[in-house]
Image (cartoon, rainbow, N blue to C red):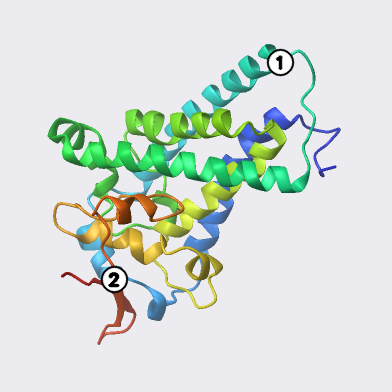
Amino acid sequence: MVFWEGHVSDELMGTFAPIIIYWLYASLYQLLPRLDRYRLHTRKEEEQKNLVSMSTVVKGVLLQQLVQAAIAQVLFMVTAEASSSVPVQPSVPVQIFQIFVAMLVMDTWQYFMHRYMHQNKFLYRHIHSQHHRLVVPYALGALYNHPVEGLLLDTLGGAISFLVSGMTPRTSVFFFCFAVIKTIDDHCGLWLPGNIFHMIFQNNTAYHDIHHQLQGSKYNYSQPFFSIWDRLLGTYMPYSLIARREGGLEARPLKD
């Protein structure tokens, strides 16, 4: 039993909980004290390098989430109609396995789509370059993408992960909320001590920062969970964290 049972349907929670979590968690990062000693970039760098205003970023994220919500509702409706009975919630171990499968599927989909959007000059220039206008990423901009990229990379990737894993709408609430939190953390620009994501995942804030900073962005395409495909296909770029003289940290690539 979950706290929303009897009040809101699992399908409605699966649609809107990730959106609510996005704005709550991202806003928490934005409202934190300055914490300059944990920033991967100075505030001056953020102001000088980023090519888009925060208001534009917020509007772009809201547009993507509008499309995401509409497609989620259609997906839940279609899968419900295809089933002859109300889905039975599996045991916790089965749900954990389904979530792990969904993580692998999402990583695979996003790696190859993300890499292709860099390698195809037309797609990069007209679509993916919008995300890289945030040269110095921050939490509220985690899902700032061109609408086409948001549809192909995130929304469609999430739908495929949901279908392949066989999870129920209730399990999907936990998976998609977790995916959103992880994505925000990867873009927050802070290397906070005790961050559990940095302990568990090598694909983390600094890992993704390398992707945003390297000229041509030929490395660290993997997102949002593991670095498996980068390692297997030669696009993995390790890094070291260096203390800056003016304070804070810098993720520095370790080139061969």
Q: Nearer the viewer, residue 157 or 141?
A: 157
Q: Nearer the viewer, residue 189 or 166?
A: 166
Q: How many marks?
A: 2
Mark 2 residue crowding within 10 angstroms, few (<14) / some (14–19) / many (20+): some
Q: Does the CB distance between marks 2 and 1 fall below 8 Å? A: no
Q: Report the amino acid beneath label 2.
A: Tyr
Residue 228 showing in the rendered view: yes
* Residue 142 position (above or below residue 31): above
* Residue 242 position (above or below residue 166): below
Q: Position of residue 60 (x, y in %)?
A: 38, 37
Q: Report the amino acid beneath label 1.
A: Ser
- Secondary structure beneath disc 1? loop
The residue positioned 71% from the left and 43% from the top of the image is 94
Q: Quadrant of residue 226?
A: bottom left
Q: Quadrant of residue 242?
A: bottom left
- Residue found farthest to the front: 232
Residue 83 circle label: 1
Q: Is residue 22 left or right of residue 85?
A: left
- Secondary structure beneath disc 2? strand
Residue 20 showing in the rendered view: no
The residue positioned 43% from the left and 44% from the top of the image is 107
Q: Quadrant of residue 56?
A: top left
State the residue position of label 2: 239
The residue positioned 69% from the left and 28% from the top of the image is 11
Residue 141 circle label: none
- Chain-order first, disc 2 or disc 1: 1
Q: Position of residue 62 (x, y in %)?
A: 46, 36
Q: Position of residue 88 (x, y in %)?
A: 80, 29
Q: Position of residue 194 (x, y in %)?
A: 54, 76
Q: Nearer the viewer, residue 155 or 23?
A: 155
